[in-house]
Every structure is written in structure tokens, then in C-alpha cells.
Image (spheres, helix red, strand yellow):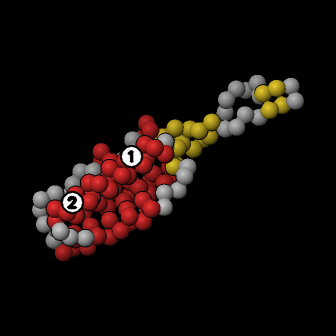
Amino acid sequence: MNQVLNMADGKKFRMAVAQLRGFRSHVRTPIAQIVVDEYHRIIKALEEATSEYLEQFSIPHESMKARPLPEIRHTRGFSPLGPQFTHEKYCDKDFFENQINGLWAHIENVIGESGKA
């Protein structure tokens, strides 16, 4: 980002960076949809403040997967139903951390270029 942020956008940018910093330092696991939604709100705030397209740092819907539930063991063996999965979907922790760390590295570059925030 080579443009200088104006005062209002600079304030929005600093607020969004603060949100990202706090979010990044306290990522809750497992990475449920509510966590991903919160991360996407921060990305949107950064996009609005910088006019940059940051979608490449988001979590694609297809990356959200149901998790297997523990098998129920009956006295005669395992459940005849086979593997059971959660209704809620989750994101792989390593993938999520790669995305958030990539966004953070990009933001550090933006801060270095603009000398602000």
C-alpha cells in the first residue's frame, strides 16, 4: 500500500490492527465457525481502512470441516452406526495460523511503508 492513509482511515486502520493483534495473541481452539467469523470481521475492517483486497488471507468455506465424535463403545463392541461427526464445522489449526500469520506479516509491511499505526 503506497498511499498515505488519511486521518479517518488511519484511525480505522490502527483500530483494526489492534483488534488483529489482540485476536492473534488469544486464538481460541478448536477453530469453530464463530472464531472464523470474528477473524473475517477483522479482515473486513482492515479492507475498509486500507482499500486493499485481503480475501487471500481469509478462511475458505471449503476449509471448514466437521470433526469426528468419539466412538460410542457398547458392551458388544463399537457402535454399528459407524463414525459420527459434529454438526458444527471447524478449521484446521495449522491452516488458520498460517492465514493469520500471513495477514500479520502483510500488515507489518503496510505499517513499515506508511510509517503509521
Tell me what residue is drawn at x 44 percent, y 53 percent.
37
Tell me what residue is drawn at x 54 percent, y 42 percent.
89
Residue closer to the observer: 74 or 41: 74
Which quadrant does the C terminus fall into?
A: bottom left
Residue underneath mark 2: 110
Say which element carries label 1.
helix
Q: Position of residue 86 (x, y in %)?
A: 62, 40
Q: Position of residue 100 (x, y in %)?
A: 38, 52
Say which element carries label 2.
helix
Residue underneath mark 1: 98
What is the quadrant of residue 6 in the picture?
bottom left
Q: Position of residue 12 (x, y in %)?
A: 27, 69
Mark 2 and mark 1: Cα distance apart in space: 18 Å
Numbered tag placed on residue 1 in the rendering: none
List the single residue furthest toward the left: 3
Q: Position of residue 5 (x, y in %)?
A: 16, 68
Above/below status of 94 relative to 35: above
- The residue under label 2 is which amino acid type? Val
Badge 2 vs badge 1, beta-carbon distance below 8 Å: no
